[in-house]
Structure formats: C-alpha cells, structure tokens
Image: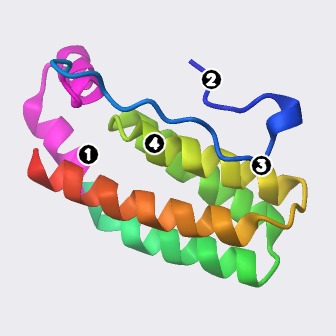
Amino acid sequence: MSCLPAQEDAGKQPDFVPTAPGVSAFSALDEMREQLGDDAAVARFVANYLALLDQRIVEIGESIQRARRDECITRLLTLETSSHMVGADELSLRAAALRLAVGRDQADTGMLFAELTRSASSTRAWLASG
C-alpha cells in the first residue's frame, strides 16, 4: 500500500479514511504480533515509538525552520514508516504529505506541519488507550 499522493496532488493533504466500525484499529499491531509471535516485543516497539514521538515532531519542526531539507525528509520518512508499522495511518499520511511538500519547496509546509502535530497528539492518545 502506498500512502503517497499522486504527483499532481503532491503536498496537498491526503485523504484519511478512519477505521470502519467493527474493524480493529490495532490490526497492524495484531499482524506484527502474529508475525513475531512475541507480545512483549510488540509492546516494546509501541513503547519506544511513543517515547520518541514528541521528540521526532520537534526535530521535524526544527529542520523545517532551519531549511534543512534533506534532514527533514529523512526524519519524515522515519516517522512515516514507523507510524505505518504501529497502524497510525493518518499520521503516516500526514508525514508523507509534508515530506513531499518539503521536497518540492512548497509554501504550505507550515499548515502541513500543524496538521502533523495534531495527528501526532491524536495518535499518542489512541495508542495509549490500547
């Protein structure tokens, strides 16, 4: 599954389709548990993800402010990938949209970063509740 918007939509906010009623929002974590066969390893992965989340957002913001494009793209790729792995698809999509905007020097990075920050907060609450 690619979460990248089409070339002509690069930098625009991608659509997010919330989990359908009755479908486990933790399906990505369930799949990881099944693949690893180790609940403790999955719990550690989620704990590490949450422990790093706020700092990752801060560092992305700093990279944007300092116009460190390559550094920012790398940080966003890391957030995008790890978010997808824990099932935080909205945050993953927001990171992808911002990464594309930064890569193309688009002017809407401030708005996209604000959306990324809000999504990170929602993701933190969602994962902490599970």
Q: In this figure, which residue is indicated by the disc labeled 2?
A: 2
Q: Distance between the residues labelled 3 and 4?
A: 15 Å
In the rendered image, which quarter is residue 37 located in? top left
Give the crowd class for mark 3: few <14, some 14-19, many >=20 residues within 10 Å: many
Look at the numbered discs 1 and 3 and tell me whether their residues touch, using CB distance below 8 Å. Answer: no
Disc on the earlier residue, 1 or 4: 1
Look at the numbered discs 2 and 4 and tell me whether their residues touch, using CB distance below 8 Å. Answer: no
The residue located at (66%, 46%) in the rendering is 13
Magenta stretch prevailing secondary structure = helix
89 above or below 56?
above
Which disc, if any, is residue 45?
1
| Position of residue 65 in the picture relative to residue 23 (left or right) | right
Disc on the earlier residue, 2 or 4: 2
Disc on the earlier residue, 2 or 3: 2
Disc on the earlier residue, 1 or 2: 2
Q: What residue type is labelled 1?
A: Phe
Look at the numbered discs 2 and 3 and tell me whether their residues touch, using CB distance below 8 Å. Answer: no
Q: What residue type is labelled 3?
A: Gly
Quadrant of image for the C terminus: top left
Give the crowd class for mark 1: few <14, some 14-19, many >=20 residues within 10 Å: some
Residue placed most toward the observer, 13 or 43: 13
Q: In this figure, which residue is indicated by the disc labeled 4?
A: 90
Q: In this figure, which residue is indicated by the disc labeled 3?
A: 11
Residue 82 appears in the figure: no
Helix, strand or loop at mark 4: helix
2 above or below 69?
above
Q: How far apart are marks 1 and 2 (CA)?
A: 22 Å
Give the crowd class for mark 2: few <14, some 14-19, many >=20 residues within 10 Å: few
Q: Which amino acid does label 4 sit on?
A: Glu
The residue located at (28%, 21%) in the rendering is 20
